[in-house]
Amino acid sequence: MDLASSEEREQLRHAVRAFLAEHSPQTEVRRLMETPEGFDREVWSRLADELGVVGLLVPEEYGGAGAGVGEVGIVLEEMGRALLCAPYLSTAVLATGVLLHLDDEAARTDYLPGIAAGHTVATVALAEESVRWDAAGVAATATHDGSGWRLRGTKMFVLDGLHADLLLVAARTGTGTGTGTGTGTGTGTGTGTGTGDDDDGGDGGVSLFAVEGTAPGLRRSAMRTLDPTRRQARLDLDDVPGRLLGAPGGAQPTLAYLVHLAAVALACEQTGGAAHVLDMAVGYAKTRVQFGRPIGQFQAIKHRCAEIALELDAARSAVAYGLWAAQEHEVELAVAASVAKVRCSEAFAFAAAENIQVHGGIGFTWEHPAHLYFRRATSSELMFGDPAHHREQLIRHLTVEAGP
Amino acid sequence: MDLASSEEREQLRHAVRAFLAEHSPQTEVRRLMETPEGFDREVWSRLADELGVVGLLVPEEYGGAGAGVGEVGIVLEEMGRALLCAPYLSTAVLATGVLLHLDDEAARTDYLPGIAAGHTVATVALAEESVRWDAAGVAATATHDGSGWRLRGTKMFVLDGLHADLLLVAARTGTGTGTGTGTGTGTGTGTGTGTGDDDDGGDGGVSLFAVEGTAPGLRRSAMRTLDPTRRQARLDLDDVPGRLLGAPGGAQPTLAYLVHLAAVALACEQTGGAAHVLDMAVGYAKTRVQFGRPIGQFQAIKHRCAEIALELDAARSAVAYGLWAAQEHEVELAVAASVAKVRCSEAFAFAAAENIQVHGGIGFTWEHPAHLYFRRATSSELMFGDPAHHREQLIRHLTVEAGP
Amino acid sequence: MGVRQSDGDPDGAQDLEAFRRRARSWLAEHAPSREGLGPGAGAEGAQGASYDVSVFHDLSFDDEKALIERVAGWHRQKIDAGFGALDWPREDGGVGLGPEFVEAFAAEETRFAVPPAHELVSVTVHLIAPTIGLVGTPEQRDRLLRTFLRAERLCCQLFSEPGAGSDLAALGTRAVRDGDGWVVNGQKVWSSGAQFAAWGMVLVRTDPDVPKHAGITAFLLPLDTPGVTVRPLRQMSGGTSFNEVFLDDVRIPDSLRLGAVGAGWKVALTTLGFEREATGGHSGVGGGWRQLAPLACALGRFDDPLVRQKLADVYISERLAEVASLREAAGRASGRPGGPEGSLRKLHWVRSLALASVAAEAVLGARLVADTGEWGTFAWTAHILGAPGYRIAGGSDEIQRTIIAERLLGLPSEERVDRNRPWREIPR
Amino acid sequence: MGVRQSDGDPDGAQDLEAFRRRARSWLAEHAPSREGLGPGAGAEGAQGASYDVSVFHDLSFDDEKALIERVAGWHRQKIDAGFGALDWPREDGGVGLGPEFVEAFAAEETRFAVPPAHELVSVTVHLIAPTIGLVGTPEQRDRLLRTFLRAERLCCQLFSEPGAGSDLAALGTRAVRDGDGWVVNGQKVWSSGAQFAAWGMVLVRTDPDVPKHAGITAFLLPLDTPGVTVRPLRQMSGGTSFNEVFLDDVRIPDSLRLGAVGAGWKVALTTLGFEREATGGHSGVGGGWRQLAPLACALGRFDDPLVRQKLADVYISERLAEVASLREAAGRASGRPGGPEGSLRKLHWVRSLALASVAAEAVLGARLVADTGEWGTFAWTAHILGAPGYRIAGGSDEIQRTIIAERLLGLPSEERVDRNRPWREIPR
């Protein structure tokens, strides 16, 4: 586990931070979160062209930088700090990761260059009304009508799904009934005690399809979100043409990988967010005077800031672990991803809430940025499986690996 | 819900506190916790004769005071404060409560006068190797051999069981297999998700028997305990004669009542214990000087004391609720008992742990009383069902009553 | 659940029972019963059919205005029927009964679908009116006491400032004597309902050269006075429950001074003391067991053992809050003083809100992240985003802990660098 | 899991790999492998077959003495083979390698069943020896450095006092100059292993008329000096890991003074600084995932969703502690300074102990209340009763938070009434 940060990585961090300071200050975040599209296409292009971070994961042969998850983690952390409004997680991490994980060279050749160049906004559509992020929760179906595959069903929580050019949609290609083989509490997002995220569930396999944003029969609508800086959409698919990716019925391992990658990516963002609110809280505690003293002199405030720092430190360890596993040790990724998701969710949620408390009244206003981090923290905690779900997954994976 | 304290009750509290200050100071607790018997027979007699609190629950016709659970609650709270080493919970509360709850006038006539007079130390034996406090966990059996009932099996966690004169023993009188119809995690003391405490479980009914401490075939051994001020025993019954109490197979409601009564009684003790450690912590915080100031001036200590006070306040509400239900509103007792057990366990555990922390090093020594309260708190929290178990029971009872 | 009689009224038990029956029958005539409304129904259940789990209102100006009028109207209806202002002296427009009658009526009222509480009305009736009753001049009493007690005009608090939050006594809004009046300049914040109030009770600094508590004076200020600007302040949960109030060369006649010059801090403590006495004001704020349990069932989450644990904590916390208010009522009835118990109640209540947030997250999971359209789910974001506000508003958690530690437990107060120094010299 | 090379040693990677292989083969010859010992095995797994989840030892005097001898013996064995004192200079008896070699050896060593750490040995070797190396006189170095480094004689800390816990610098044990020596009177407490130590490093007050930090001096004290009385102190978990040490007219020659007169606080900080650097000392203290998971299985508790949640928290906490120590090693290797990170580590570790207590309670329930005789169950009471001790020992949670807040975050320090005042005048 090489946990030292190289000089190149520090340069990357520096470059991203400088870029975001210029192109995504709070005023810009405020502006974009009120726009219909929710992000700035020009900044997105610059992220791809100038900074070259959109294609960071994309191998060089497809026009990307061929860097590793470690580099992406740095970018995500900085974006989490700045609350950048952009389809980075969806396009540059999840959709890219899925395309790289699938065994489908043609798809890579067709889609990755556009992604790396910043031309294609892409996303993955997995969850549905069952509010689960696993193959077993997929009820949408795809049938082959002789000329091609046709998709039907509803997708929810699709990151940046309203404006994405390319949607990677999970659908059931067998004759199965969709959800339902899970025993236990299959409908929850929390600890489904009966079904694992690795469990395919239905008797029919699940496949991934590439669907164009402009495809006929696709109806997209924005979902109201808790976090206005991250857009999500509902897709209603009615006989929508799609291109099968990889082998039919073989998407389950990729979907499991997707969730693990999402967990690690969110953990990076969460760590950046926690670091930022710690800075905010400490800065305020040093300057805000009550009772004739800076409030940072009061142990109630001082020790709370220390607690945030402690949580942040744990988050940093968790991110280091998750990135290491994602980069070098995929056999441990399921465990590391759940560890990272649990710990970084806890850390950021605590940090964001306590930052408001340190600020007092001003921190509870709409105008103050504190609540945007609180919204992001709550939202990230509950996406792709909440901490209770990931604790359960962790135990399951530890048990499968070695017996407890 | 009459929550005002009458003058008589305040007098009772005063009398008990004064008695315990004289007869159960810390030095005496220390002495008794090292003796084989674990309590002082003479003090026990005085509790019965002078103070009249042993027969508080016993109706006047059997030589008792005919008082209510409310009065007993005050006595228990004071005993919890003083960590009195005596078989009060077992004899004056649980065994007495069971005898009053059963429909067996002869047994009341035979046993209650001795209890009220302080001559009979009595207890209830329910739990076994399955570590459950409900009828479904009973595997011990009783068979009628023509001349009388004979008991076989093992009982554990029997309060004051080593020296009790009278043991009220739960045993299975049907042909059932004992434990085992519970689905879920039947062996745990925590949240058995499959079996309810009101669930009889086996196909044979469970009955209660009076067994003499001197009965042939009864082997009693002390169990090592976390809390040295409360003794517990293991009973091995090998063809032990017992007297059937109430109707055969009909003990289940009484056993359920026993657990509820125990929960409320422990809650009273816990509240007394929490009140005492709060006093200790506050007293120390006022006098201990570090960095040139009483440590109670530091917010870290000051706010922690406030948190203990807050927990104590919740415990007081929970006890008021539990006692009210036990006294006047038995239909709500199952809910109120679980509420009291959960909240008072949390409160005392927190208070006892934080009291040690407020004291620093000295609070971690054997000589200091802080750890005796920590032991009592941990022990009481886990007896008769831990908080997780009682939360589950609470939800179950709320659901049964009214639908959620 | 009866509340014990005070000992001074041996025949009270009968009177109280008769009163209770009378109240019940009057209520039955004037308000729909809550029986059979089902567990999800909040205040006003039947007609509202609303599902409001928000901690802070997020209503339009017109909707909130209408709500306030309904609340104030119901309040006057009760007074006119002899069921309001029960414990006020007859000469002030009250009924002259003991607190046990107030509790009894309140208990009966919970069985009916009546308008909910609104903070501005409560502040006017329960905080400011009694303050005027205690320290107001005869003219002030004549002019404003009944008006406020009947909620005919409403009066908000103008206490906090951007620079004086937890440290309220550090406030810096200046009032300078000018003839028979005062000229006030400064800014207030966190004033609930100022946009709907005709009056404000304002604390100002009249003497900066004495220690901070000694230089404050209280006034009653008509909010249509020139120089008063009320600007709604949007909170993180959306909605504008609070306001900033700017005071630019605002002239207040000395006749509207409330209490002596320099006695404003004592007057403010009197007002805040009534706040601590007013119980039950928290119920109905935010969501809880009543909404969460059926929601968990509807979503198939009620069988999850983890969800059940968290729901149990919500239930316990709410049930014990009810018990605690009965305990306090009993304590008051037997003459026990109030004191820092209000701080215990507030901290428990804040914790209760947080437990409901935690349980809602367990029940709803990602349904809080984006609105799936399922009824009653995404609405919980208003609870989760509002709950942090009450860790701060009305005295932060930290301030409450200090009050408990110092006043209930007698722990020594901290070293204070701002004590016995002129306000002017204290770092700010 | 490799640790990054320091940049100054470009060829180090090869050397390190070779070293690692050499270490592994030496270890294989001298210690049994831990492979196949099963998950329940602690340090020494095979031969010990012990199940020790206690946080503090509860051994008889003879057993603890034997343990210490075994630990010290293994330490010497490593030194003699060139695997101990790896990062010490050759002239002091070390090998002169970089910290990456220390880490590499430690990583290899975890695969073998070797004696566990013992605090007294660690204090002697890792804390006191390097302090002497830094501030000792040539005579002190000659006489004691190698002896301590090789754990041939052991040396405990005599720092804390009954009246000086968190506020260590307030210590009041007095030393008065007397010819070429000092006469010491006072009482020390919380001295681990004093009953097994030949020496003690003692902090005393040599000047009460200057501010508290300025009047302290450090000495090395042979514990067989007349007037020294060591009395074991029983802790709440049972066992006597600590001692009270009474000093009555104890004479110490000035030649055993460690550092300048009045420089004792700096010397103590040096010693404590080594404590913060020494990593991994916490592993093996108390129980954790390795014992709890199989225990939960054996008791049929592993399927309980609530138990699983709590076990997950234990696993996460322990795994991240490992990652954190790798992160720190990497940080040290690239020259990042240590500082208050030790406080972060300690707080995490204390939390880890508490999480294990919580999980043990969930797994065991009433099996902690009384001993049912089931293997490995009641033993957990030693964990639960010991864990609170480390919220206090080695710098309380509160002290650690203050260190983090002030040194890592740069928050202002509190108003200090004891600063710049003679020690004599400070309230105690």
Image: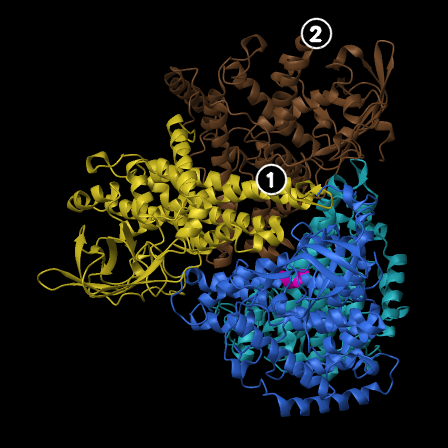
Chain colours: A yellow, B cyan, C blue, D brown
Circle 2 is placed at which residue position? D139
Percent coordinates x, y for residue D390 in the rendering: 65, 39
Q: Where does the image place residue B124, in percent across and percent down from the top left? A: 69, 68
Q: Position of residue A52 (x, y in %)?
A: 30, 36
**1 or 2: mark nearer the eye:** 1
Query: Can residue B339 be seen?
Result: yes
Q: Are marks 1 and 2 in contact (CB under 8 Å)?
A: no
**Image position of D192 (left or right of A176):** right
Name the residue beneath numbered marker 1: D347
Q: Which amino acid does label 2 sit on?
A: Glu
Q: In this view, does C21 lie above or below A305?
A: below
Given residues B399 and A268, the one toward you in this image is A268
Determine whether the residue tagged by mark 1 lies in a helix, strand or loop: helix
Where on the picture, by quarter, is residue B268? bottom right
**Residue at image coords 74%, 50%:** C170
Q: Is residue B85 visible?
A: no
Residues drawn in magenta: C347-351
Q: In this view, does B202 lie to the left or right of C399?
A: left
Crowding at dot 2, Cα within 10 Å, few <14 / some 14-19 / many 20+, comes out as few
User: Is D386 situated above or below D80?
Assistant: below
- Give the camera-side residue of D200 and C93: C93
- Asked if the stretch drawn in magenta spans residue D201, the answer is no
Please identify the residue farthest to the front as the structure is shown: C179
Label whose residue precedes the other's in the sequence (1 or 2): 2
Q: Is the magenta stretch mostly helix, strand or loop?
A: helix
What amino acid is found at the position of numbered circle 1 in the picture?
Answer: Leu
> Up-down: is B95 above or below D213?
below
User: Which is more toward the observer, D217 or B34?
Assistant: D217
